[in-house]
Image (tube, grey):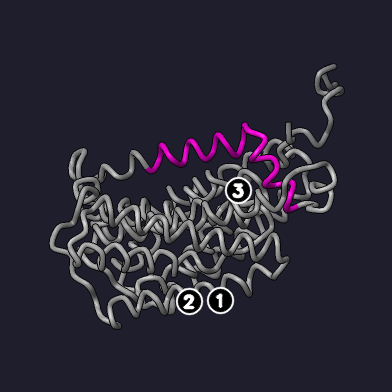
């Protein structure tokens, strides 16, 4: 059997490269669908409107919390203070409202606190050249302590859930909270900045070779400070949403978000841009974790089994990233 001219001229690795790239780009999307169908076959409650609304509300809050973190990690740094910044903003918002502040004033105070923490983190890391992990562990501890002090270790109740309450309630058929729409718009804008603007290219260039980026005149210190400030801002906004959702400020609310936040960012970094955290990957991974955790709860699995599954996800993502990295077709060309 003779080969056609086109078959002879096509590089033998092109087909494998395209398949590898398709696998890299879509494997987590496929995983969301497969896991959803598998769990729903055993627990149809997973697809009930009330449960979908709960998953999407948690999805929206988590996405807001880690959007800034995604870029910090993409730049080669780390921020483990994000969840305690959210707790601080949550308690500041609740405490201010309890003292008679209006919601706009409480929101402004909470967001300002998040930005200030981010600016401090960024300045210490970029200008003072201190290790990001140590810096953010320290500021996380300070934020957690201040949050506890604001409520004297107890929950601060909120009488009025505020302007975000309606957005957090089930709508659009009783299954989709309206908060999903603005969150997706914000994520789309972040994706545009990441993929189409010079700012986004600088983020990834810093992770590859910060010294080289400095040598061509890029203001690395300023860029790093901005990234940490954005991380603080997004975490503080999530804390405000939690205050509205729970009608309270809870000083211990940040702890559970550490592992989940890092997981969705790192797992999302194993699709689309292999080994590089990115907005689309974070969105998909957050939805995946939300469906998985909701499903395991419905299936009655204990927490330790959920943690085992979560660790397995990271291992699976690493295998996918390693496979894709061996094929040139899986890597996106930077323009």
- The percent coordinates of residue 58 (x first, y second) are 33, 57
Which numbered marker is on residue 142?
2
Q: Which quadrant of the figure has residue 121?
A: bottom right
Disc 1 on helix, strand or loop? Answer: helix
Task: Check the picture and name the quadrant holding the C terminus.
Answer: top right
Mark 3 vs mark 2, CA separation in Å: 34 Å
Q: Main secondary structure of the magenta part?
A: helix
Residue 197 is inside the magenta segment: yes
Q: Residue at x 67, y 53 (%)?
A: 75
Q: Residues within 10 Å of mark 3 (few under 14, many from 20)?
A: many
Front residue of 5/243: it is 243
- The percent coordinates of residue 14 (x first, y second) are 77, 33
Dot 1 and dot 2 residues touching (CB under 8 Å): yes
Mark 3 vs mark 1, CA separation in Å: 31 Å
Disc 3 on helix, strand or loop? Answer: loop
Q: Is residue 129 visible?
A: yes
Residue carrying label 3: 271
Front residue of 128/28: it is 128
Q: Residue at x 26, y 56 (%)?
A: 54
Front residue of 263/156: it is 156
Which comes before the other along the chain, label 3 or label 1?
Answer: 1
Q: Residues within 10 Å of mark 1 (few under 14, many from 20)?
A: some
Residue at the far left in the pictured view: 159
- The percent coordinates of residue 182 (x first, y second) are 35, 39
In the displayed structure, does residue 58 sit left or right of residue 82? left
Q: Is residue 275 visible?
A: no
Residue carrying label 1: 138
Q: Which residues are magenta?
A: 183-207
Disc 2 on helix, strand or loop? Answer: helix
């Amino acid at each position: 059997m003779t080969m056609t001219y086109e078959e002879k001229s096509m590089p033998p690795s092109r087909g494998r490269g395209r398949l590898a790239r398709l696998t890299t780009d879509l494997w987590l999307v496929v995983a969301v669908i497969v896991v959803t169908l598998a769990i729903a076959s055993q627990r149809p409650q997973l697809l009930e409107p009330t449960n979908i609304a709960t998953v999407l509300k948690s999805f929206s809050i988590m996405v807001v919390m880690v959007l800034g973190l995604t870029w910090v990690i993409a730049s080669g740094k780390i921020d483990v203070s994000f969840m305690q910044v959210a707790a601080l903003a949550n308690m500041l918002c609740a405490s201010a409202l309890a003292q008679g502040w209006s919601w706009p004033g409480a929101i402004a105070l909470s967001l300002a606190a998040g930005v200030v923490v981010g600016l401090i983190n960024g300045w210490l890391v970029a200008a003072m050249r201190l290790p990001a992990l140590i810096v953010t562990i320290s500021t996380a501890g300070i934020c957690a302590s201040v949050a506890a002090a604001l409520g004297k270790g107890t929950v601060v109740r909120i009488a009025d859930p505020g302007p975000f309450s309606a957005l957090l309630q089930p709508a659009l058929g009783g299954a989709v909270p309206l908060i999903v729409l603005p969150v997706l718009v914000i994520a789309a804008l972040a994706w545009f900045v990441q993929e189409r603007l010079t700012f986004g290219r600088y983020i990834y260039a810093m992770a590859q070779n910060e010294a080289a980026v400095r040598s061509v005149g890029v203001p690395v210190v300023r860029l790093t400070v901005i990234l940490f400030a954005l991380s603080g801002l997004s975490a503080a906004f999530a804390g405000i949403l939690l205050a509205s959702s729970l009608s309270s400020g809870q000083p211990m609310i940040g702890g559970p978000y550490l592992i989940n936040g890092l997981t969705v960012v790192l797992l999302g970094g194993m699709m689309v841009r292999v080994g590089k955290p990115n907005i689309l990957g974070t969105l998909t991974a957050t939805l995946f974790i939300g469906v998985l955790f909701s499903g395991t709860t419905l299936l009655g699995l204990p927490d330790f089994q959920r943690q085992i599954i979560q660790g397995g996800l990271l291992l699976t993502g690493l295998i996918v990233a390693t496979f894709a990295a061996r094929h040139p077709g899986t890597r996106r060309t930077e323009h």
